[in-house]
Amino acid sequence: MKKGVITVLSTLAGTMIGAGVVGKITGETISKEKGMSGKHLELFLMMNQWVKVKQEGKNLASYFEKYGYKKIAVYGMSYAGETLISELKETDITIAYGIDKNAASIYVDVDVLSMEDNLEPVDAVVVTAITFFDEIEEKLSEKMDCPIISLEDILYEV
């Protein structure tokens, strides 16, 4: 009889502990997923604005020409970074290099450096990782003496 009670209590205790762990993991997972969802929404809205800019017959090169930025670097070599490089390819704007935390594993049409590398002077750095712009701007400002601009800001100004 005692063995049966101990088994039931052990099972009950194990279930409660397991439920607590699952609840914690689920809460952490949900929080992470909400963050990713927000990030992807911001990127979607930025890319949607880019489509609108293109539908209006505009090109981002005009923004750089307006401010006299002839040689730029691009921070963030994912979809937006690659698209920016592609759009500026046949213009008078030179992409000196890309910057990305995963520089060693990225293959695009320009050299890609990490934030720790020696970053040569450019007229401006365009940050395509818009959800982390403030942190990236702070770090780049310590290394570079040029404007650091969010791609999102460019798209709404052009």
Image (cartoon, rainbow, N blue to C red):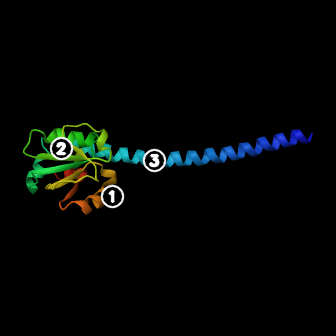
Q: Work out whether residue 65 or residue 121 is closer to the camera in this orientation and state it.
A: 121
The kind of residue tagged 3 is: Lys
* Neighbour tally class for label 1: few under 14, some 14-19, many 20 plus, Cα within 10 Å: few
- Of mark 2 and mark 3, the one earlier in the sequence is 3
Where residue 149 appears, x then y in whole percent?
Answer: 22, 55
Q: Which of marks 1 and 2 is in front?
A: 1
Q: What element carries label 2?
A: helix
Q: In this view, does 90 lie above or below 101?
A: above
Q: Can residue 156 be spotted in the picture?
A: yes
Q: Quickly name the residue at label 3.
A: 34
Where residue 80 appears, x then y in whole percent?
Answer: 26, 42
Q: Quickly name the residue at label 2.
A: 53
- Of mark 1 and mark 3, the one earlier in the sequence is 3
Q: What element carries label 3?
A: helix
Q: Work out whether residue 99 or residue 129 is closer to the camera in this orientation and state it.
A: 99
Q: Which of marks 2 and 3 is in front?
A: 3
Q: How far apart are marks 1 and 3 (CA)?
A: 20 Å
In which quadrant of the rendered view does residue 88 lie? Answer: top left
The kind of residue tagged 1 is: Glu
Instruction: State left or right for residue 4 relative to residue 119.
Output: right
